[in-house]
């Protein structure tokens, strides 16, 4: 094994990652200079709207992009994923790192039984397994993810299962080889609340049992509050704020983070809110993104231009709390008249 | 007179099979549902997928045939033969879940929004144009957008085109079937705020169908919780959230992720306790076939499906 041994406990370290897609003749970065790290037994949540680049980032870590240009460093246990050969990738993917995809109906093969699909993940990484070994392990896995009557479900096809069950099968495939890094891309978006709570409990148990590092991609701030240890907020390809989960909810700094938090109805307090905060404008598309200055500037027009930095960078304002651009120091929520005037 | 009254609504879909493809059984999608909505209020219909909430909504507007029961809109039974000719569809409109599939991609925005006007109003081209521009203005879209096609808009904008179409005929009741679940958080806020604004302006009544309790709580005055085609609990928003009685409601409320990370441990305990109660007392809350009991009055506003005591 050509594996460098690192002494720090960082499982994954991403340095200055750019993932660019070609639109006509130019490349546009969907992930723009992202650096972050994940430790063992840690859940890092990545939050952002659609188009913010969070899924592009996850796919880059797994090297699942077909035609994207990936630059930078993705160190998985000290080894750069970007430099891995296809055969080395096949060794690592599905074994040391695994992914739970968003939509189980499209991610599962409709022509293979549940048992075959989970068994495949096992067999491909250990050819010495006998059919009996594989079957025993599959039943064990189905049981572990809380599927009732695993002996029966093992011979069923995905269409015979409900959404929650399918998602569990996906999780069973992802954890089949006890991965050290698990990337969960919106694992509960397609599910009902009670099932969501069960799946989240399951992922949390796995983290504790297997000491795995987890990257949880979601747009649901409630899920973040329940699951994450640290949170990275992405906007237009960049990380705008990264901190531990308590600080994020109690003392958010970046205007985007604060706007997001203000735009969801508070489900636990009993008093009725009057109006939800609306973030003006839309997420800029890749091709029309201004690559200079603060990218959030256009969506908070009531903040004076001088508040923004010319070349905003992530800056550590307290230990472990990074915020991009100085505009957070001047940010406030406008009242109604002010919005109308602009 | 109640604005909208649903009386013992049943929608069964036949399962066919056997010799001659006869009806052998039925899926009881909606199985005896009754509720009332007052004008100008929002009624939230909550349930998991498969609970029959969408079927209920579709039955009210006539997109599903009903098996039995009555839908009384301003005192008139929408399904009686006598009222067949009544154009109640003018007064009841629907906002669909997925703004990507509910707008015809081949039509311009003008044609999409004008379609209900063309069906019910006799307008000249010029009047129609002004009307459509006015509607788009109301939903916050610019005048130029009338000659564009749906794919040129973002999800939130599309949903607002859908809303413009729904309010074109100045309806009294709007059935909103998961209107924001396909949208991003920030866009969700925009659409919800907007729905509240036009409700005040046009004195609209909403039947708000959703599986997201947080949003339902934000929007609704009264809430009904459905499970397997029946109501398990009905009450004012406060009844449901501060005093849930049925175990299924408790499970739903417990499953909402808490936005405060400090409550994580507490929330987990609470969820476990509810789950334990659910497993232990399942028989108390559901009958032999796993269905909910008929609703019983608990207070003036609060009804719950529990078996009669004694």
Image: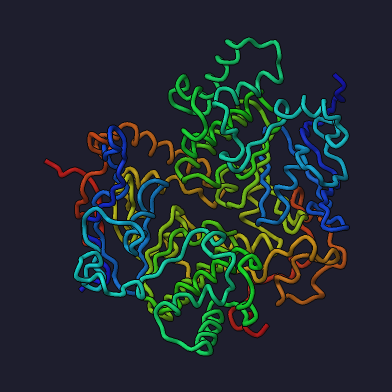
Query: At 50% from the left edge and 22% from the top edge, which residue is drawn?
Result: A155
Q: Position of residue B26 (x, y in %)?
A: 28, 42
Query: At 24% from the left edge and 37% from the top edge, which residue is drawn?
Result: B284
Q: Who is closer to the viewer here, B189 or A153? A: A153
Q: Is residue A307 visible?
A: yes
Q: Residue furthest front?
A: B20
Q: Is residue A139 above or below residue B26?
A: above
Which quadrant of the figure has residue A43? top right
A238 lies left or right of B45: right
B99 lies left or right of A312: left
Q: Residue furthest left?
A: B310
Query: At 57% from the left edge and 60% from the top edge, which residue is drawn?
Result: B100
Quadrant housing the N terminus of chain B: bottom left
Q: Position of residue B193 (x, y in %)?
A: 51, 71
Quadrant housing the C terminus of chain B: top left
Query: At 73% from the left edge and 52% from the top edge, which residue is drawn?
Result: A53
Q: Position of residue A113 (x, y in %)?
A: 54, 26
Q: Is residue B196 above or below residue A86?
A: below
Q: Is residue A37 visible?
A: no
Q: Who is closer to the viewer here, B176 or A209? A: B176
């Amino acid at each position: 094994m050509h594996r460098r041994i690192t002494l720090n406990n960082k499982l994954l370290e991403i340095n200055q990652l750019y993932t660019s897609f070609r639109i006509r003749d130019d490349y546009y970065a969907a992930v723009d200079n992202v650096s972050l790290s994940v430790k063992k037994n840690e859940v890092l949540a990545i939050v952002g709207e659609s188009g913010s680049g969070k899924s592009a980032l996850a796919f880059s870590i797994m090297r699942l992009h077909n035609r994207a240009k990936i630059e930078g460093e993705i160190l998985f246990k000290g080894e750069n994923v970007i430099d891995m050969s296809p055969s080395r990738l096949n060794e690592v993917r599905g074994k040391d790192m695994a992914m739970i995809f968003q939509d189980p109906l499209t991610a599962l093969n409709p022509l293979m039984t549940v048992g075959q699909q989970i068994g495949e993940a096992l067999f491909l990484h250990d050819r010495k397994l006998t059919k009996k070994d594989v079957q025993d392990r599959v039943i064990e896995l189905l049981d572990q993810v809380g599927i009732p009557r695993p002996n029966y479900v093992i011979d069923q096809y995905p269409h015979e299962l409900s959404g929650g069950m399918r998602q569990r099968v996906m999780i069973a495939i992802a954890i089949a080889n006890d991965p050290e890094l698990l990337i969960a891309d919106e694992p509960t978006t397609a599910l009902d609340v009670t099932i969501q709570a069960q799946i989240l409990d399951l992922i949390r148990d796995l983290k504790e049992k297997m000491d795995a590092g987890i990257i949880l991609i979601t747009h649901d701030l409630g899920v973040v509050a329940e699951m994450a240890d640290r949170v990275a907020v992405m906007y237009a390809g960049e990380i705008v704020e990264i901190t531990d989960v308590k600080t994020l909810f109690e003392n958010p700094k970046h205007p985007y983070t604060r706007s997001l938090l203000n735009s969801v109805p508070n489900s636990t307090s009993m008093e009725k809110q009057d109006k939800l905060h609306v973030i003006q404008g839309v997420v800029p598309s890749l091709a029309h993104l201004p690559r200079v200055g603060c990218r959030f500037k256009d969506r908070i027009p009531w903040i004076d231009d001088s508040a923004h930095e010319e070349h905003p960078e992530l800056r550590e304002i307290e230990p472990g709390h990074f915020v991009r651009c100085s505009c957070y120091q001047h940010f406030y929520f406008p009242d109604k008249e002010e919005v109308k005037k602009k | 007179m109640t604005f909208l009254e649903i009386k013992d609504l049943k929608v069964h879909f036949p399962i066919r099979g056997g010799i001659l493809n006869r009806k052998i059984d039925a899926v009881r999608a909606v199985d005896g549902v009754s509720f009332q909505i007052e004008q100008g209020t929002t009624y939230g219909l909550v349930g998991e997928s498969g609970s029959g909430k969408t079927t209920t909504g579709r039955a009210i507007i006539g997109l599903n045939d009903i098996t039995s029961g009555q839908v009384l809109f301003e005192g008139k039974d929408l399904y009686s033969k006598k009222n067949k000719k009544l154009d109640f569809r003018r007064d009841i409109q629907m906002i669909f879940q997925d703004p990507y599939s509910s707008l015809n991609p081949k039509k311009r925005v003008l044609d999409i929004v004008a379609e209900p006007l063309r069906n019910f109003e006799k307008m000249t081209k010029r009047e129609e144009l002004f009307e459509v521009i006015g509607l788009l203005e109301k939903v916050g879209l610019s005048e130029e957008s009338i000659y564009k096609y749906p794919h040129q808009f973002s999800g939130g904008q599309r949903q607002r085109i859908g809303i413009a179409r729904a309010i074109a005929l100045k309806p009294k009741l709007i059935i909103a079937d998961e209107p924001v679940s396909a949208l991003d958080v920030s866009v969700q806020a925009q659409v919800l705020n907007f729905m509240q604004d036009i409700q005040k302006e046009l004195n609209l009544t909403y039947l708000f169908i959703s599986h997201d309790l947080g949003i339902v709580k934000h929007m609704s005055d009264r809430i009904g919780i459905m499970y397997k085609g029946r109501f398990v609990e009905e009450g004012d928003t406060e009844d449901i959230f501060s005093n849930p009685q049925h175990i299924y409601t408790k499970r739903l409320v417990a499953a909402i992720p808490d936005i405060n990370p400090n409550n994580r441990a507490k929330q987990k305990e609470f969820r476990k306790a509810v789950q334990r109660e659910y497993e232990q007392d399942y028989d108390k809350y559901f009958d032999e076939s796993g269905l909910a009991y008929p609703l019983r009055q608990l207070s003036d506003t609060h009804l719950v499906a529990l078996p009669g005591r004694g």
